[in-house]
Image: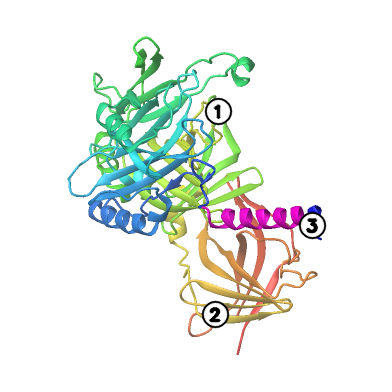
Amino acid sequence: MKSPVKYITIIAFIAVAALISVLLVLPEDFFKTKKAEFHQTRYLRPVLQNDDFDALDNMAELVAATKSDQMKINLDDGEIAVAVLSEDFDKDGSQEQVIAYRNLLKENNPIYLTYIDYQEDTKLYNRVWSGPSAAVRPGTVSLFTQDLTGDRSVCIIITGMNSNGEHTITVFKVARNYTAVTSAAAATSALSGGAVISRIADIRIDGTISIIETERTQAYQLGLTNGASFDIRGRGRDVSSSNEFDQIEITYSYNPDLERYVQKTVNRIPGAQVETAYLRRLLGGNAAEFEQFISGLWYRVAPDMSINNSQYIYFDTNGREIIFYDKSTQQVYKWLSSTSTRYGLYVSSQNISVTTLRRVMDIELESIDSIRVKVFEDVRMKITLSAPWDGSYRKSASSKKSDENAALPVEPYINAAYNGSLAGIVFSSNGEYVLNVSERIESGRYTFFALDRQEYLELLPEDTQADPPNAKTFDGAAGNEKKLREVYRVDRQAASIDGKSESFSLQRVRLSAGGVQEFHEDPIIFNLSE
């Protein structure tokens, strides 16, 4: 006769096996409302070189189609996503979504926002709320959240430009007592009644708009008390003045009783006098005209009008790049698009090394040889008074000597191969080069250019192959270090019949607002290959 213990063991084994089988066939979200997803803000921003709205629409449609998997719902016919923001708005441990979209079936239609939440009864995402913003141009839109009011409410902020070339900011506040909508019927009711989200700010100005942050107490940081609200400041033209450069600065503050932003202060700021005809040509709505004006090197000017030689910006209009220098740091951004404003340009750019880093610049003409720059960093349009790149810039003397440089003709691209004692280099007519140093191959882009009647060569590496640990570059640097662009002074020898130099030497230098800085390295000689 079998022992009862054996029967119990067999029954327990069968029960455990059955339980495991049931768990394997259950849906993934059986024990939770939904699977938590953690995404960064995604911007479906079109990349344009001009202000062509037809192309903008087509590009937006193409980008949205390729990014549709990032959205939790399908938009209606004609609706094209511009930006997607995922965040836990109702603090239920899972993420909701806000989508900024444009309806292509309607002309000059504003950018709309729609709020997406999860319904328990259908196990699906649905629209809970929708509302228009003041922005119209998709290529200028930025979408983010921030506690502007200081009471820990979620504020959805969308900035951009409208069809009149004005900067806009629209702020929507999510109700503090809002909880997740549990059914599709409740979602439809909230959508029609607008109870979920309210508009607390809608500001438009033909200048710049900034969010002015103030320090909040430690008690706020610990969740014990509310904090001070942030002001919104707009700066634009003073229409009451005959001088085009006189400006008016309006500050808006949050009124908790009215639950919206109201005008707080108005300050008038006198501007420089600029010749009217030149001003009309430069600010006539042609982005290319202003791009040519800012092309070149600009150095930072301190409030006391002293020159800051350690911080400057280089606008490469032809190469479609913007280079930021700060002491020993160099940041290179790809110039994506330009949009004309009343006083200058609204420029969108992307870091060439870290593509998730975006930088938007609001560039305004300050005088005949100075500009004022506001930089909106990365994916958040978050501006403070101490932003590192904000301020006035003057054009460097080297950028003003274009007439002198024109006397020194330099071909930017050649088609030739050269050998040296340390390296061999091949230049192609399409602007690409291949450098071979000690079994190490480096490829990238190059350009020859002239500055103050001296020729220079710029190398921008893109790829490196077969890089042994102890390899050296042809200028003596360690080969296993990641190289950024390098600039070399070029001294050519006698030229051959076809225009190529029989030999030339390269000596590494650095270009700065103060001029050319020498590294005092030995020059490298290259001879034309047979």
Residue 247 vs 257, above or below: the answer is below
Q: Earlier in the sequence, mark 3 or mark 2?
A: 3
Q: Dot 2 corresponds to which residue?
A: 495
* Residue 369 seen: no
* Residue 105 seen: yes
Mark 1 Cα shell of 10 Å, populated few (<14), some (14-19), many (≥20):
few
Q: Amino acid at mark 2?
A: Ala
Task: Give the number of the mark in front: 1 or 3.
Answer: 3
In front of the other: 35 or 109: 35
Q: Amino acid at mark 1?
A: Ser
Q: Earlier in the sequence, mark 1 or mark 2?
A: 1
Q: Dot 1 corresponds to which residue?
A: 386
- In the figure, is residue 517 to the left or right of 35? right
Q: Residue 6 — which label?
A: 3
Q: Residue at x 57, y 18 (%)?
A: 216
Mark 3 Cα shell of 10 Å, populated few (<14), some (14-19), many (≥20):
few
